[in-house]
Image (cartoon, rainbow, N blue to C red):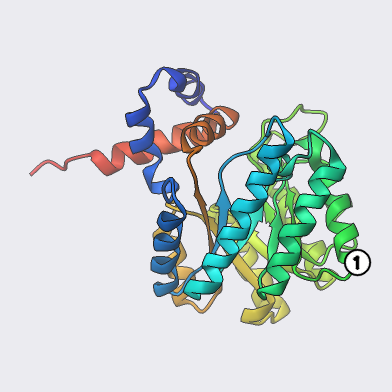
Amino acid sequence: MTRLDSTIARVLPAVPRPIVRRLSAPYIAGPTLDDAARVVRRLNDEGKMATIDVLGEEVGIAAEAAEMATSYYKVLERIERDRLDANVSVKLTALGLELDEALCRENLEGVVADAAARGNFVRIDMEHSATTDAALRLYGELREEGRSNVGVVLQACLRRTVSDVPGLVNVRLCKGIYVEPLRLAFHDPDEIRGSFLAALDSLFDQGAYVGIATHDEQLIGEALQRIAARGLSRDEVEFQMLLGVRPARGDELVRAGHRLRVYVPFGTHWYEYSIRRLQENPRLAGYVAADTLRRFRVPFV
């Protein structure tokens, strides 16, 4: 992380909302479900799958958590109605985890049951480290109850991640964007990459289905080598990327015959999401700033 990255992240709250909206536009589908459906349809036409995420987390009252669950029912209905190749990703804090775990479980069970009735899938997203135990616990309980249409996320930056692998069946493996204390997480990029590959090997060893969620070219290359060495078929693994990030590389993976799923966030909380994510990960703030400059740069002629 550079000093410039940190400076960019600190000044973001002072940036006018229209500018933040313009900066975040490539990475967020828009404020409405219609926006998300439009983006997913375009991705599907490009041979890519999608995961839809409704923006909003850390709700303050039970009614807000119920409203978030209702939003996901609408997303799942839209996916089915429009025959989109997409599933959904849910944040447990948005379903009430920090209010009451029983409330969160009730909301989560409802979304998972609705998805199952429509032949769809729910990914339990991973958030800051204080929620990791609950996420793995709720995932495990639902799988034990026969809910095969639910998966979870592991963050390679956490020191515990490799030890969390045993027993997991369907996992999105990512580096993780939350800034955690050194006692809980690796901060060195090479250590994070090492943890990512160790977790990937362990997941493959136990036959788990893995969504390899990274834009890191080194990790993409290592993953491709492992897929080839193990003779894994197209249906046994997929790559995952964020909307608007390295789309050309995603196109290359699709042309090479790999499954690619793009994470598509939408909702009225786009501003809070953009500011929070960029402040939580100053490196990402620097990346977005550099990417934005490239988009607006006019070449000399």
Q: Secondary structure at mark 1?
A: loop
**10 relative to 285, above or below:** above
Q: Is residue 56 left or right of residue 266?
A: right
What residue lies at 38% left-to-right and 47% top-to-bottom? 26
Q: Position of residue 298 (x, y in %)?
A: 17, 40
> Can see residue 172?
no
Residue that protrudes farthest toward the front in the picture: 63
Q: Nearer the viewer, residue 202 or 108?
A: 108
> Can see residue 55?
yes
What residue lies at 68% left-to-right and 67% top-to-bottom? 115
Can you tell which quarter of the image residue 171 is in?
A: bottom right
Residue that protrudes farthest toward the left in the picture: 301
Q: Nearer the viewer, residue 30 or 64?
A: 64
Q: Is residue 147 left or right of residue 267?
A: right
Q: Position of residue 211 (x, y in %)?
A: 66, 63
Q: Would you name the residue on which mark 1 appears? A: 145
Q: Is residue 45 left or right of residue 74?
A: left
**127 relative to 234, above or below:** above
